[in-house]
């Protein structure tokens, strides 16, 4: 996660940043898309397929709530898959996966662990029922951290409001410029958002002023992180705990919910084969950071949006490592549409994020809420 105003990977590279040369044990093919009518993937040249993050891919829906163009509903067909890969340099072995390799890729990096006492696990995953709804989430440490031997910096949390009226879903991403401490801030912020929203987001308050409830939740959570830092970590500054965030409150009675964010995390939708983004990215890169928490005036940074339920679909909260890949890569969209076509258990959810994509180095975190049998994002 870059500093506010910056973004990851400002200089395009020829590979995925995980080594040099090509892997003789596994071949890949450029992301040229499927044949017309197969999965809706456009048949453009490889150089045009991976966008810079500015603008909008041809198969991406309009801004959430508007008219959407044709999207994706099927599995990716962009790579050759091998499940019999040898251990990298004889060092380690890994379970096989069908996750695709997309683009021009180098040899996978040999993972380096961090001795940092406050480091987060590099792999976390959940999947199960909560208040009658199916939720799955996974967080995988990025290649940049594996190569440098630094901590993962993403966090996710979920809870139910105290009155049982709504789900609270959160993803956070610590700034990469604070490699030893921002993951602490991401975890603290996610926990405090859940704690505040449990009490503040009641059925009545969401109906009366859902946007205000979410904005106030982030303001109070930011202040709580600052108080905790001052009491328990006085040697640190607020900036050492800087994190971006996306949060959704989803009522269980089917009424529209709300989303809010600070920074470059995003809330996405996938319905009847069409992807959509709740928050616009403007003309800049998907992973350009506009703000982070804690902050002295968080209300100035909060973006809010209403969620709608016009048709059945998935609600997806993603840190920029996943959001950027989804926005820029048709192959990634096709793969995840297929993987998430049914409720995932923890292992399947984690495996869904094991794809390799040229230029994708960041932590990957996604939290997915499946629709009810009656349909709708609710």
Image (cartoon, rainbow, N blue to C red):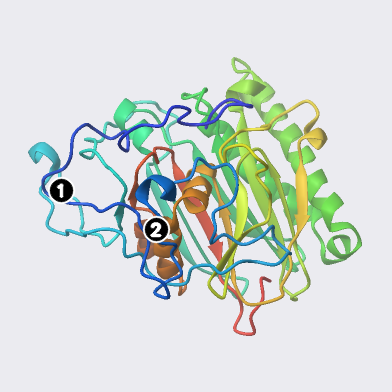
Q: Which residue is depicted at the point 19% across and 51% down?
A: 94
> Relative to residue 342, is residue 143 depicted above or below?
above
Q: Is residue 21 left or right of residue 232?
A: left
**Can you tell which quarter of the image residue 315 is in?**
bottom right
Q: Is residue 178 left or right of residue 292?
A: left
According to the picture, the residue beneath numbered tag 1 turns out to be 93
Picture coordinates of residue 141 (x, y %)? 39, 41
Mark number for residue 331?
2
**Can you tell which quarter of the image residue 138 is in?**
bottom left
- Most extreme residue toward the right is 208
Dot placed on the residue nearer the N-terminal end, 1 or 2: 1
Label 1: state its secondary structure.
Answer: loop
Q: Residues within 10 Å of mark 1 (few under 14, many from 20)?
A: few
Q: Which residue is depicted at the point 33% across and 26% down?
A: 148
Label 2: state its secondary structure.
Answer: helix
Picture coordinates of residue 76 (x, y %)? 36, 64
Picture coordinates of residue 245 (x, y %)? 63, 42
Label 1 – label 2 distance at C-alpha: 26 Å
């Amino acid at each position: 996660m870059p500093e506010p105003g910056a973004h990851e990977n400002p200089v395009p590279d020829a590979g995925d940043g995980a080594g040099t040369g090509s892997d003789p044990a596994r071949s890949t093919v450029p992301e040229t898309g499927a044949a017309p009518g197969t999965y809706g993937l456009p048949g453009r040249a490889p150089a045009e397929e991976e966008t810079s993050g500015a603008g909008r891919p041809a198969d991406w829906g309009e801004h959430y709530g508007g008219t959407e163009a044709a999207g994706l509903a099927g599995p990716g067909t962009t790579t050759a898959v091998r499940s019999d890969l040898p251990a990298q340099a004889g060092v380690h072995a890994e379970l096989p996966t069908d996750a695709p390799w997309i683009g021009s890729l180098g040899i996978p990096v040999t993972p380096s662990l961090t001795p940092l006492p406050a480091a987060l696990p590099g792999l976390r995953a959940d999947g199960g029922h909560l208040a009658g709804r199916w939720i799955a989430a996974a967080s995988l440490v990025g290649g940049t951290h594996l190569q440098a031997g630094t901590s993962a910096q993403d966090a996710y949390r979920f809870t139910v409001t105290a009155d049982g009226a709504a789900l609270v879903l959160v993803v956070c991403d610590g700034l990469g410029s604070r490699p030893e401490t921002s993951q602490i801030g991401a975890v603290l912020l996610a926990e405090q958002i859940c704690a505040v929203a449990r009490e503040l987001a009641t059925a009545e308050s969401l109906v009366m002023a859902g946007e205000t409830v979410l904005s106030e939740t982030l303001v109070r959570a930011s202040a709580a992180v600052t108080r905790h830092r001052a009491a328990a970590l006085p040697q640190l500054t607020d900036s050492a705990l800087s994190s971006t965030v996306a949060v959704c409150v989803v009522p269980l009675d089917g009424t529209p919910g709300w989303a809010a964010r600070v920074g470059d995390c995003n809330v996405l939708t996938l319905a009847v084969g069409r992807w959509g983004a709740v928050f616009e990215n403007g003309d800049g890169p998907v992973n350009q950071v506009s703000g982070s928490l804690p902050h002295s005036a968080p209300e100035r940074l909060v973006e809010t949006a209403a969620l709608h339920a016009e048709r059945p679909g998935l609600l997806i909260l993603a840190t920029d490592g996943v959001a950027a890949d989804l926005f820029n890569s048709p192959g990634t969209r096709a793969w995840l549409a297929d993987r998430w076509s049914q409720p995932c258990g923890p292992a399947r959810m984690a495996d869904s994020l094991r794809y390799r994509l040229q230029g994708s180095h960041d932590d990957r975190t996604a939290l997915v809420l499946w629709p009810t049998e009656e349909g709708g994002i609710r």
